[in-house]
Image (spheres, helix red, strand yellow):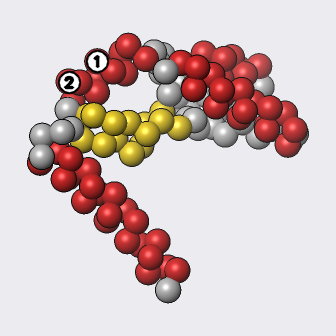
Amino acid sequence: MYMQKTKLIPIILMAVAISFRTTGTGAVDIHSHNVLPTFVEYLESKGASLDETFPLPHWDVESHLTFMDSAGIETAMLSMPAPQPYFGNIEETKRIIRQYNEASAATW
């Protein structure tokens, strides 16, 4: 039963996004990343800034909002980009993620 419900979640999210788009109120971007400079600095300090084989892009609120407007996106759900900040120390990882979340909240 659980598997059946989890398979429905992407379909439901897509239906919500389509309904927003067709009603003229804007799309919902459910996969978007905010790349904070402090996170990039942290990755660089760990030698992990290219772990995904490419550098993380420059990101700022104004550019993101401009892109959203041009693409008809009303809402974006932001999350931390890869790579994830675990380098063998769980307490450090918790601290970095907490700082990321707080900085993200303060950005808006």
Q: Are marks 2 and 1 in contact (CB under 8 Å)?
A: yes
Residue at the disc numbered 2: 70
Q: Which of 108 and 50 is in front in this view?
A: 108
Residue at 40%, 65% in the rendered image: 9
The image quadrant that residue 10 belongs to is bottom left
Mark 1 burial class by Cα count in 10 Å: few <14, some 14-19, many 20+: few
Q: In this view, does 93 lie to the left or right of 72?
A: right
- Disc marking residue 16: none
Q: Position of residue 68 (x, y in %)?
A: 28, 27
Q: Is residue 56 visible?
A: no
Amino acid type, callout 2: Ser
Residue found at x 26% / y 50%: 17
Disc 1 residue type?
A: Thr
The residue singled out by tag 1 in the image is 66
Q: Is residue 39 above or below residue 72?
A: above
Give the image location of residue 31, x and y in percent.
Answer: 42, 43
Residue 49 seen: yes
